[in-house]
Image (cartoon, rainbow, N blue to C red):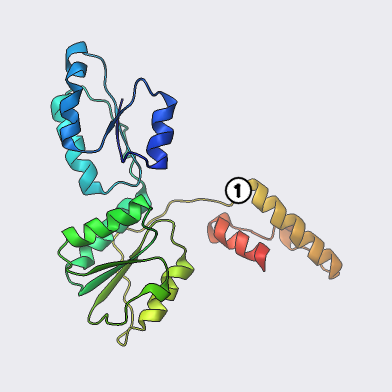
Amino acid sequence: MLYVGHAGHEEAVGTMAVAPEAVRLVEHVTDLDALGELHETGAPVALLAQTTLSHDEWRGLMEEARRRFPDLWMPNRSDLCFATTNRQAALKAIAAEADAVVVIGSANSSNTVALEKVARASGCSRVIRVNEASELPDDLSGTVAVTAGASAPEALVQAVIDRLAPTQGAISVPVTIEDEYFPPPPELRELLRALSATVSLMAGAGVGPGGDPIGDDREHSAANVLEALAS
């Protein structure tokens, strides 16, 4: 199996550990040159990707691997993270028109680093990565695009926008509408239900219809439930 990823990345390390004798790490197209023996053996070859790769980075390797291994097996759907690819697509739509791009996320986050690369490749001359709003430089002007790594919390994104204080307001540029559904895990739901029941009982009230404080899953993410527990 060929695994396209970065050496040392936790996902790559974990994937390769499953079958170390059968997995070959590929970081660059030139790495495929060292796989000549796979052509000779005629063994079936599969190709998987680190989920946080840049789409452009992945596409070039995928196309070359397909050329070299015509019977290459790949997943029916892209194994790149939808949150990663959607952010990259949105950034491409705005980076070239921006005077600067602010990328929110850690330097050791693969998908955050990929956003930096996409912004520069899209033609933006100034790309700034920050961990938090306090790291923003004071000389930003003109049109500033803001994007964030997949794990950056919404509150952090809002804090950056507030710190920028755009004089003409902030405009959201939707490119892809995400409709993926991640309900709160059953354990978290049960914890909030028990807590809600206890508080309601102490107040001499019921716990609402069905005794379920969450209600419609689609209206409450796991983050919402954790926030409710904290408060």
Question: In the figure, is residue 61 to the left or right of 6?
Answer: left
Residue 161 figure quarter: bottom left
Task: Please tell me which residue is depicted at 53% across the width and 57% down the height of the picture.
Answer: 218
Let me know if residue 158 appears in the view: yes
Q: Position of residue 131 (x, y in %)?
A: 41, 65
Q: Name the residue that disc number 1 marks.
A: 185
Let me know if residue 220 appears in the view: no
Disc 1 crowd, CA 10 A, few/some/many (<14, 14-19, 20+): few
Q: In the depicted view, which residue is nearer to us: 161 or 29?
A: 29
- The three-letter code of the residue at mark 1 reads Pro
Give the position of the C terminus as an image quadrant. bottom right
Q: Position of residue 135 (x, y in %)?
A: 38, 73
Give the position of the N terminus as an image quadrant. top left
Question: In the figure, is residue 146 to the left or right of 36?
Answer: right
Q: Residue furthest bottom?
A: 167
Task: Please tell me which residue is depicted at 30% across the width and 46% down the height of the picture.
Answer: 53
Task: Please tell me which residue is depicted at 35% across the width and 43% down the height of the picture.
Answer: 51
